[in-house]
Image (tube, helix red, strand yellow):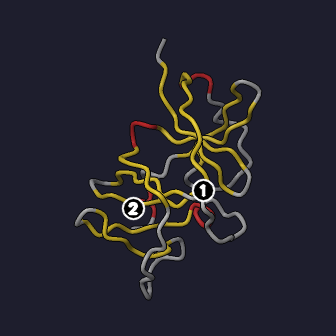
Amino acid sequence: MNESQWISFEVASEQYLHPVSKIKEILPYDVPTPVPGALDITLGIQNIRGSIVSINSSRRMLHVDEENEGCESRIILVESEDQLVGVAVDFVGEIISAEQLEIDTTSTEISSEYIKGTLNKSGKLYIVSDFSNVIEIHN
């Protein structure tokens, strides 16, 4: 059995998963400092323990409606090409265990370079994502 662990999170009322192994930390949402001329997906930057980290909008990355962050919003810090990158999400849920074979990589109709497939687990449909390639995609 080759199970991986995934963190569940919500964006625009949809359930998503991201590999736990690629997550450095999850932080409460704090409004980032805007940066003129930044990428469209970038909300701004934050100083996180002495490191300047780009904070990106999961809504913009996943091409869903824009909305203000709420009290449940979090920033998921992922490592992308040896750099930390933050991704703002609406809500972080639980850890899900699943085998790679359970992920359906053929049925996704969502067009985004961050979507890897879907997973139907315990009666819930999750969209499997991976934000660790954000720097590679936008360079």
**Quadrant in the rendering for residue 35:** bottom left
Looking at the rendering, in which quadrant would you find the C terminus? bottom left
Q: Which residue is mark 1?
A: 72
Image coordinates for residue 36, horizontal then vertical, percent: 43, 88
Q: Residue drawn 25% across and 66% down?
A: 51
In the rendered view, tell whether residue 63 sits above or below residue 17.
below
Image coordinates for residue 74, horizontal then vertical, percent: 52, 56
Image coordinates for residue 81, horizontal then vertical, percent: 31, 54
In the rendered view, tell whether residue 27 sits above or below residue 40.
above
Q: Nearer the viewer, residue 115 or 87?
A: 87
Sequence order check, earlier mark of 1 and 2 = 1
Amino acid under label 1? Answer: Glu
Q: Residue drawn 53% across and 32% down?
A: 95
Between disc 1 and disc 2, the foreground one is: 1
Task: Judge from the rendering whether residue 68 lies leftward or rightward of residue 20; answer left or right.
Answer: right
In the rendered view, tell whether residue 102 sits above or below residue 35.
above
Q: Secondary structure at mark 1?
A: loop
Instruction: Say how many tags the image has.
Output: 2
